[in-house]
Amino acid sequence: AGVVGWFGVRFLKAILVEGHTFKSYAGCTVGGGDRGVGRIGDRFRWLLGAVADALHTATGSEGQLIRATRDPA
């Protein structure tokens, strides 16, 4: 919630947890249609990107090394 606000949390939860599709969520909120589905998809990608950036999940933590061998450490 600190990254995307409570509205963002509610929105992401509706898509990721409750099983809404972009189309079903658009129909309930912005009126549906192709334009509404596009708006919901854009919002979803932006919010998910913001969360990933804030949690460093897209690139890993700074200074983190990734082993590229199968040998145990």
Image (tube, rainbow, N blue to C red):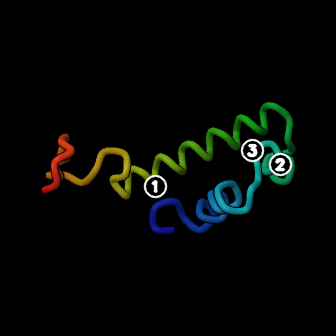
Q: Name the residue under label 1.
A: 51
**Mark 1 element type:** helix
For label 3, the residue is 22
Is residue 8 or residue 59 the one in the foreground? 59
CB under 8 Å between callouts 3 and 2? yes
Q: Distance between the residues labelled 2 and 1?
A: 23 Å
Identify the residue shown where x is 64% and y is 56%. Answer: 16
Instruction: Look at the image and tell me in which quarter the C terminus lies.
Output: bottom left
As shown in the figure, which amino acid type bears the numbered disc 2? Ser
40 vs 61, left or right, is right
Give how far across and how far down residue 43 sits, in percent: 62, 45
Instruction: Check disc 1 and give the amino acid type.
Output: Val
Q: Which residue lies furthest to the top in this view?
A: 34
Q: Which residue is drawn at 37% across and 58% down?
A: 55
Q: Which residue lies furthest to the front in this view?
A: 71
Rounded to the nearest angstrom, the CA distance separating label 1 from label 3 is: 19 Å
Number of numbered tags placed on the structure image: 3
Q: In the rendering, which numbered label is found on residue 24? A: 2
> Tag 3 or tag 1, which sits nearer the N-term?
3
Indicate which disc residue 6 carries.
none
Verify CB contact (< 8 Å) between mark 2 and mark 1: no
Compared with 6, 66 (above or below) is above
Q: Which of marks 2 and 1 is nearer the N terminus?
A: 2
Determine the residue positioned at 86% across, 47% down.
27
Crowding around mark 2 (Cα neighbors within 10 Å: few <14, some 14 to 19, many 20+) is: some
Q: Tell me the kind of residue under disc 3.
A: Phe
